Amino acid sequence: MASVRVLRPGLLTTVQDAGRWGLQSRGVPPAGPMDPWSHRMANALVGNGADAATLEVTLKGPELEFDDERIVAVAGAHFAIDVDSQGQSPNTAFIVPAGARLRVGARRIGARGYLAVTGGFAVPELLGSRSTHLVSRLGGVEGRALAAGDSLPLGPPGGPRPRRSAEAALPASDGPTRIRVLAGPHLDKFAPDALSVLQSSPYTLGNDSDRMGFRLSGPRLVHANGADIISDATPLGVLQVPASGQPVLLMADRQTTGGYPSLATVITADIGLAGQLAPGDQIQFEACTFQDAMAALIARERALMALEDGSPA
Amino acid sequence: MNGDAFRLVHAGDSVVVAELEDRIDERVNARAIRLAAAIGRAGLRGVRDIVPTYRSVAVYYDPLRIDFSRLSDLLSLEAPAADRGEVDRRERRAPVRIPVTYGGVDGPDLADVAAFAKMPEAEVIARHTGRVYRVFMMGFLPGFPYLGTVDPAIAAPRRPSPRLRVPAGSVGVAGAQTGVYPADSPGGWQLIGRTTLRLFDRSRANPFLLEPGDEVEFVAER
């Protein structure tokens, strides 16, 4: 089976597919890409199905050596990319010849790139998914980030129908990134003005923000009646508020349940944009309606479907 | 007694939560588990995950494949049947027996719990093994059961600062809850013993020893 050899792993590079869904009732977090839209885009660019496993590359990318010739794309955050020292563009498919070295360097905009290879990364499935969950050490390569010397099996390249290029939603280069939220699920556990306080000025991502969640600092959110609730489900994108009043935005590797109330939830269309943020970045939250959230989701889905179903480049 | 509290709450645009009575109670929890099972049986396309908790059911769905109103209709329709307490097969399963070595290196906090309870360690063990627990829900880690409810006399609060590494199989108490760590992980519960049973083992056909609604008994090994 053809494979890719890891010469340098990058800062935090993990195998991710669409996620390990269906087992949250047994305490299994879905994991999956922090920016699901760019993950799908990367797969579409190389002609893979939407669920094929990609590498999620964080802030600084890996150096990889290829056994055989493959079509590759790095979608999402903009990274410096080269193949045997020849520069390549993000969000664009390119060919990596057999024996060539692909280097993904420093990021320029955004935090996470998705490196897709035609055929997909064929690490073994665990509980129906190849996604890496770092805390429980499940999936991917032994449940951990890539390390130098790893060899990643590739699936057969199939009949690739690569697309030319696409553009991901990325954070603002200066100033806070606008992220839309819907109120709830625990709106009634907060002071009546909490939702307006949330939108009153930006929140900054703390240094201990990771794939589980972003610790945010900004205007203090006040509970109506204490910060403890009976442990409840913790969906992707909820803003959990512990007693400190400083919210935590729960992301891909979050635990499946938690004991703090959640004031608001990031809309699905903006989750990928949130996934492009890094410590020190700022978020300006903006409450929207369910109709706005659905319109944004449909627009995003249409753009991706056009890319996935489009004619060959 | 009115056990029929039910309301639907959005958690974003891709999750709906059916909230039942806001308390930890076996009857309310049984209702949540039955409702979750009923939604699962309906097999709707676009439902991605169904998560029963102490007193709610979260349904994760793809809003581009299933309309929210269809899902909320189904939840509202199934809720009364869940209330009537139609018992599914799993609920009649015999309690799962978990052998535990209490105290010593396996249960480094047994002495602290005994001090909290103002009773000998042997009496703490007797109280912990002396009842059948319910798996109210699972979370925290793959295969971790939230078991209740602990004899109030031994319901010691969490440790003031969590341990960085709790070994797999450790049996802990945190207030009215008890549980078993399925893997090595950080943890703040009072560790009173340890089992060799694997609560989560990826090499088994069914990796999970327990599921929500199961009953559990601890048995002291010496």
Image (tube, grey):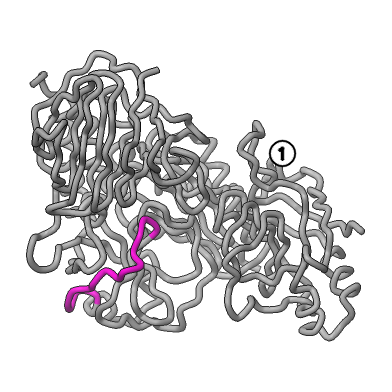
* Residue A306 x, y percent position in the rendering: 13, 30
Q: Outermost residue, top direction?
A: A159
Find out whether residue B85 is within the magenta segment.
Answer: no
What's the residue at 87%, 82% (across, down)?
Answer: B119
Q: Chain of mark 1?
A: B
- Of residues B27 and A39, the one nearer the viewer is A39
Q: Which residues are magenta?
A: A198-212
Q: What secondary structure is the magenta-colored segment mainly?
A: loop
Specify whether A239 is left or right of A233: left
- Of residues B63 and A123, the one nearer the viewer is A123
* Residue A196 x, y percent position in the rendering: 22, 77
The number of numbered badges drawn on the structure is 1
* Residue A164 x, y percent position in the rendering: 8, 28
What's the residue at 26%, 28% (across, down)?
Answer: A117
Find out whether residue A211 is within the magenta segment.
Answer: yes
Quarter where residue B120 is shown: bottom right
Quarter where residue A84 is shown: top left
**Which amino acid is tagged 1?**
Arg
Residue B79 in view in this figure: no
Q: Which residue is mark 1?
A: B89
- Of residues B218 and A139, the one nearer the viewer is A139
Quarter where residue A246 is shown: bottom left
In terms of secondary structure, where does tag 1 sit? Answer: helix
Specify whether B114 is left or right of B182: right
The quarter in which the C terminus of chain A is drawn is top left
Specify whether A308 is left or right of B165: left
Query: Vertical placement of B178 versus B199: above or below?
Result: below
Q: Badge 1, how many Cα within 10 Å: few under 14, some, many 20+? A: few
What's the residue at 67%, 54% (across, down)?
Answer: B168
